Image: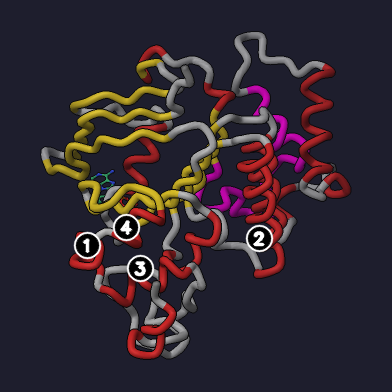
Amino acid sequence: MSVDVLDIRDLTFRYNGVDVLQDLRFSVETGDYVGLVGPNGSGKTTLIRLLLGLLEAGQGEIRLFGRPIGEFRDWTRIGYLPQKTAFVTPRFPATVREIVALGRLAGKRFPKILGRTDREAVQRVLERLDIADLQDRPVGELSGGQQQRVLIARALVNDPDLLILDEPASALDPEVRDRFFQLLADLNTERRVSIVMVTHDLGTIGRYSSKLLYLDKRIVFYGTYEEFCHSEDVTRIFGAFAQHVICHRHGAPTDGGGLTPNPLLPGMAAGPCGEDRCGEERK
Ligand code: ADP
């Protein structure tokens, strides 16, 4: 029997006595690609920090690959790509290769020394991401898109079974972003890497992910796109137009494109076709 990658039961978390997450209950199975969405302040980052063991749950349980998080040691199975590029100063004192190699050190006990297998893994991932030629460059000198690829390489260097990504595409230009999403799709379909991705871009996440988790302190919706598209609850909460745009997975301009922003759905404006004009497309 296969074990869930993530299993969350009755999870509640508070900052200073105020509930930030309430009674979350969901699981992620091997090969799931989950888009984690919700308004600002809905608890997405807090949930990610809990999953990475950076915060401790007040109530409830988190199981990673079948083990309670307190007993989980196999952190190399999880790759994490943070939201912001960390190398803010041009003189950040590390090369591309050193930053990626840090990902290998994370899984080692003392003494933390890299061997030949580690060096080979670093080389492989640098080549896979097309940054082998940058490996001796100080990371602070690279462009935002290149730095992002270095962080992606670090997240992938251990061949993780689960990738957690926080707004990963925000610093990427469109061409790099398309390649990045293609890489994730390949990892997901060919290697069955499970993915949890925080995004504001509800208009396009449906092109990539297989499930949607809409958070607003509680879970407002969690399920497949097919469930999302046929749920009357979803129509009631989000409105028929928003449901339609997401279900057709044709995306909407994230800058609003001069159209009215949708307050319920961050990053999604009224899309390329209005509800009246898209009516005939709906199944
Ligand atoms: P999101 O990532 O969806 O924008 P967050 O998880 O960052 O949401 O925040 C959820 C709520 O928790 C917000 O109301 C935020 O103000 C609050 N919060 C986040 N971090 C802290 C903190 N360190 N101390 C107190 N409150 C916090």
Q: Secondary structure at mark 4?
A: loop
> Does mark 3 have its CB less than 8 Å from ligand 1?
no
Q: Earlier in the sequence, mark 4 or mark 1?
A: 4
Residue bearing the label numbered 2? 144
Residue 151, percent across and down?
64, 45
Give the number of the disc on residue 197: none
- CB contact under 8 Å: marks 3 and 4: yes
Magenta-colored span: 81-105
Residue at point 45%, 33% (across, down): 29
The residue under label 1 is which amino acid type? Glu
Closest to the camera, between mark 4 and mark 1, is 1
Q: Earlier in the sequence, mark 3 or mark 1?
A: 1
Q: Is residue 46 left or right of residue 75?
A: left
Q: Secondary structure at mark 2?
A: helix
Give the number of the disc on residue 232: 1
As measured in the structure, the alpha-carbon distance from the residue carrying label 3 to the one carrying label 2 is 24 Å
Residue at point 49%, 78% (across, down): 253
> Could you say which is closer to the camera, residue 151 or residue 267?
267
Residue 115, percent across and down?
80, 16
Residue at point 35%, 62% (across, down): 229
Closest to the camera, between mark 2 and mark 1, is 1
> Does mark 4 have its CB less than 8 Å from ligand 1?
yes
The residue under label 2 is which amino acid type? Gly
- CB contact under 8 Å: marks 3 and 2: no
> Could you say which is closer to the camera, residue 224 or residue 79?
224
Closest to the camera, between mark 2 and mark 4, is 4
Give the number of the disc on residue 266: 3
Residue bearing the label numbered 4? 38
